Amino acid sequence: MVEKQIVIGLSNGLEERPIAVLVQMASKYESSVYLLSGNKKVNAKSIMGMMGMGMKSGESVTVMTDGADEDEAADEMINYLKG
């Protein structure tokens, strides 16, 4: 399992288009991919779940991946979210 806390660097945070891109990226991995913010834990492969997160630029989130390709999945999610 990989777990890393980061700060969202996308200038507009996670709005509809960036969420769609993130979900597409997460969905190509076999590993489970979750984002944690406050007391919310959401499957990054779920468009509806991600829309409900309402994450903004500068917000701290934890990227959590678990599975065969967890390192690659974590790296891609982190790089994308950092902007």
Image (cartoon, rainbow, N blue to C red):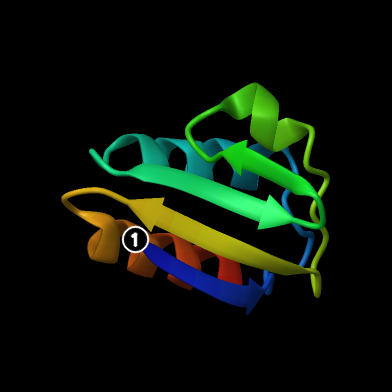
Residue most extreme to the left:
68
Tell me residue 39's x, y (percent). Answer: 80, 50
Direction from residue 54 to residue 45 in the image, left or right: left
- 26 left or right, relative to 57: left
Residue 83 visible (yes or no) = no
- The residue located at (45%, 60%) in the rendering is 77
Q: Which residue: 75% across, 56% down?
A: 37
Image: 68 above or below 72: above
Q: In this view, does 28 lie to the left or right of 8?
A: left
Determine the residue positioned at 60% across, 51% down. 35
Residue under pointer 1: 1
Q: Position of residue 75 (x, y in %)?
A: 35, 69
Q: Which residue occupies the foreground of this view, 62 or 76?
A: 62
The N terminus, quarter of image? bottom left
State whether residue 3 is above or below residue 48: below
Residue at the farthest top position: 48
Dot 1 crowding, Cα within 10 Å, few <14, some 14–19, many 20+: few
Residue type, mark 1 in image: Met
The quadrant in which residue 5 appears is bottom right
Determine whether the residue tagged by mark 1 lies in a helix, strand or loop: loop
Q: Position of residue 24 (x, y in %)?
A: 41, 36
Whether residue 57 appears in this view of the structure is yes
The front one of 74 and 8 is 74
Relative to 78, does residue 70 appear above or below in the rendering?
A: above
The C terminus appears in which quarter of the rendering? bottom right
Residue 12 vertical placement versus 25 (above, below): below
Quarter of the view holding residue 47: top right
At 55% across and 27% down in the image, what residue appears?
A: 46
* Foreground of the two, 68 or 83: 68
Please count the marks in the image. 1
Name the residue nearer the viewer: 51 or 20: 51
Q: Where is residue 30 in the image (x, y as percent from the top left)?
A: 23, 38
